[in-house]
Every structure is written in structure tokens, then in C-alpha cells.
Amino acid sequence: MPRTVDLDDRRRIVGEAAWRVLVRDGPTEVSVRKVAAEAGLPPSSLRYTFPTQASVRDAAVALLVSRLRERVDRAASASGGHDAARAVLLELLPLDDERRAEMEVTVAFAALALTDASLRTAHEQTHAAVRDVCALALAHLDAPASARAAGATSTPGAPRLADVDVELTHAVVDGLALHLLAQAVGTDASWAVTALDAHLALLARRP
């Protein structure tokens, strides 16, 4: 590794190292020393950019959220309307190794944040990111075909799915994800996709 590293590159390197430690060892094991070792950097080199355990943990969470948003953007841009909403929400279900790792970390933060205030911010960030994805999905579901053709997800004054539908969708996705995590890796997960499709069908039939 070069002796001098651009700040953005360093943040990326540390974020990826923190993510690997987070997935492998769990949220409570993400320390400056362990992340520095994972990144191949001396701990002293992280002193100013990542001085605390919380800061390296935040770097890992930021990477999680960034990767989720990139996947969601790709899924949304590949189609429109119902298909876009479905594709976006499927990114929240642990249907492959990457998404399973993300959901395991998200659930771990949620559980630990109940008793550890230092993890509350990380939990709130991941929770908000998932809700934002649900809101985006429903905006695609709600947009008329003419607006979708123009690249918009909704039009001013058009009927909108209510905020309660976003919260309901968030709860449905979280519930499906938890059930998927509880079942053995490699077992059939098609039931969760079927359940998600049923939820979207119910929303589409709303007046």
C-alpha cells in the first residue's frame, strides 16, 4: 500500500475493513485496533479520521447504506411502476449472501441498541435507510404511467399512498426478512417473494 493515501481512499479502505470485521465478528468487536489490522494500517494512522470505536463502526454502517442505495438505484432504473417497486423491495430481503450479511448486521444493531446507547445511532441509520427504500418503492407503485415515462415517481396533486402504507410495507419487509434469517441457509425462500407480491397486490387495489 502506498505510504500516502488520499482521504477518500482511506475512508473507503477503513469502511470496507470495518464492514468485514462487523460481519465476521459482530458489532461489539469493531475496534480501531482490529479494523486497522484488517485494513493493513497502523492504528496510529486512524487517529484523526477514525479516533474511536464509534467512528469506525459508523464507517461500516455508511458503507452498508451506500451499497444498499446503489443496488436500489439500479433496481429502480431498470423498470418502472409495479416492477420497480417489487425490484426495490426485493433488495431488502436476505435472498443471497450479501443481503443476508446486511440484514444480520441490521438485526444485530437493533437488538444491541436496546441496551447499549452507543449503538443507537447506527441502528437509527439502518432503520431510516430501510424506511426510505420502502417509501421509494411505494412512490414507484403510486406513479401514473405518464409520469413514469417522463422519469418521475409521482406527480403533484396525484393520489398518494399514505404514510401508513410506507410504515406497513416497512413492517412487512422487516417481518419477512426476520423469518428468512430464522430459516436454514439454502432452504426455499420463494414463499417470502410470494408474500411480498401479495402485499403489493393489496396496495395496488387500494382506492
Image (tube, grey):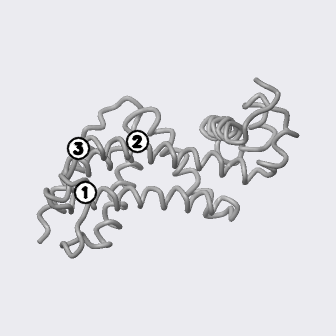
Residue plotted at (72% across, 42% down): 7
Give the x, y percent position of residue 179. Answer: 38, 47
Coordinates of residue 149 in the picture (x, y in percent): 18, 52
In this figure, which residue is indicated by the disc labeled 1? 140
When the figure is inspected, residue 55 is found, relative to residue 142, above or below; the finding is above
184 lies left or right of 119: left
Query: x, y percentage for residue 32?
Result: 79, 43
Could you tell me residue 89's position as x and y percent? 32, 50
| Mark-to-mark CA distance, 1 and 3 | 10 Å
- Residue under numbered circle 3: 79
Q: Which residue is mark 2?
A: 71
Classify 1 as above or below 174: above
Query: In the image, what residue type sits under mark 3?
Result: Ser
Q: Are marks 2 and 1 in contact (CB under 8 Å)?
A: no
- For the residue marked with disc 2, what is the amino acid? Arg
Q: Are marks 2 and 3 in contact (CB under 8 Å)?
A: no
**In the image, 184: left or right of 83?**
right
Q: Quadrant of residue 75?
A: top left
Kind of residue sitting beneath label 1 = His
The mark that comes first in sequence, 1 or 3, is 3
Secondary structure beneath label 2 = helix
Q: Kindly identify the residue that appears in the image at 30 percent across and 37 percent down.
A: 189
